[in-house]
Amino acid sequence: MRSRFSAAFLFSFFLFSLSAAYADEQSEARDFFIVQCMGCHAFSCNKEGPKLGGLIGRKAAGVDDYESYSQRLKDSGLVWSTEALDDFFKDPSKWVRGSMAEYGKIEDAMQRQKLIAFLKTEDPTVNLCPQE
């Protein structure tokens, strides 16, 4: 009986630890987004940059009501996937030379992956949109 309790306790502790680690990563990625990205982006509205809601699977330069895309990005044929975002964040100037997105370079591969995972959440708490 005691070993069942110990196994259940250890399993619960393991699950809690995984949840806590995931929450910490999400919190870190959220903070990174707020500091590095939120000045120009939100999930639900266009700002200086296009809205990011529905980003995964969307064609690059595919937000109809955003008109400031570079011609190079429009012509790229790129569809945003985890891999495409990783490549983009590794060197944004490759895709959007001359735009503000060039400042979005993230050299750390783990940080890029955390940010991409956060982008998939479409966290509504970072939707600070300009007043219409």
Image (cartoon, rainbow, N blue to C red):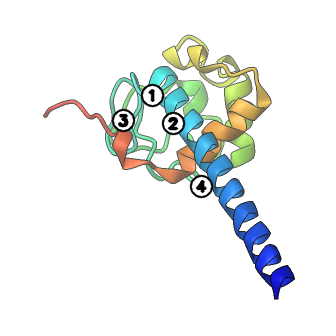
- The residue carrying pointer 3 sits among few (fewer than 14), some (14 to 19) or many (20 or more) residues within 10 Å by Cα, namely some
Real-space Cα separation, disc 1 to disc 4, in angstroms: 23 Å
- What residue did someone put label 1 on? 34
The answer to whether residue 93 is seen in the rendering is yes
Residue at 71% over, 39% down? 113
Q: Counting residues from the N terminus, which is met first, the one under dot 1 or under dot 3?
A: 1
Can you tell which of label 1 and label 3 is closer to the viewer?
A: 1
Say whether disc 2 or disc 3 marks the residue closer to the N-terminus: 2
Left or right side of 11 for 85: left
What residue type is disc 4 on? Answer: Gly
SS at circle 1: helix
Q: Could you tell me which residue is drawn at 29 percent across and 34 percent down? A: 128
Q: Give whichever of discs 4 and 3 has the lower sequence position.
A: 4
Q: Which percent across, then down, holds residue 115? A: 61, 37
Answer with mark 4 or mark 2, whichever residue precedes in sequence.
2
Q: Comparing marks 4 and 3, which lies closer to the viewer? A: 4
Tag 2: residue type?
Answer: Arg
- Which residue occupies 70% across, 31% down? 111
* Front position among marks 2 and 3: 2
Residue 39 rendering spot, x and y as whole percentages: 39, 22
On the image, numbered disc 2 is attached to which residue?
30
| Local SS, label 2 | helix
Q: CA distance from mark 4 to mark 2?
A: 21 Å
Is residue 46 positioned above or below 92 on the image?
Answer: below
Check whether the beta carbons of the residues at disc 2 and disc 1 lie within 8 A of each other: yes
- Real-space CA distance between mark 2 and mark 1, rounded to the nearest whole angstrom: 6 Å
- Amino acid identity at mark 1: Ile
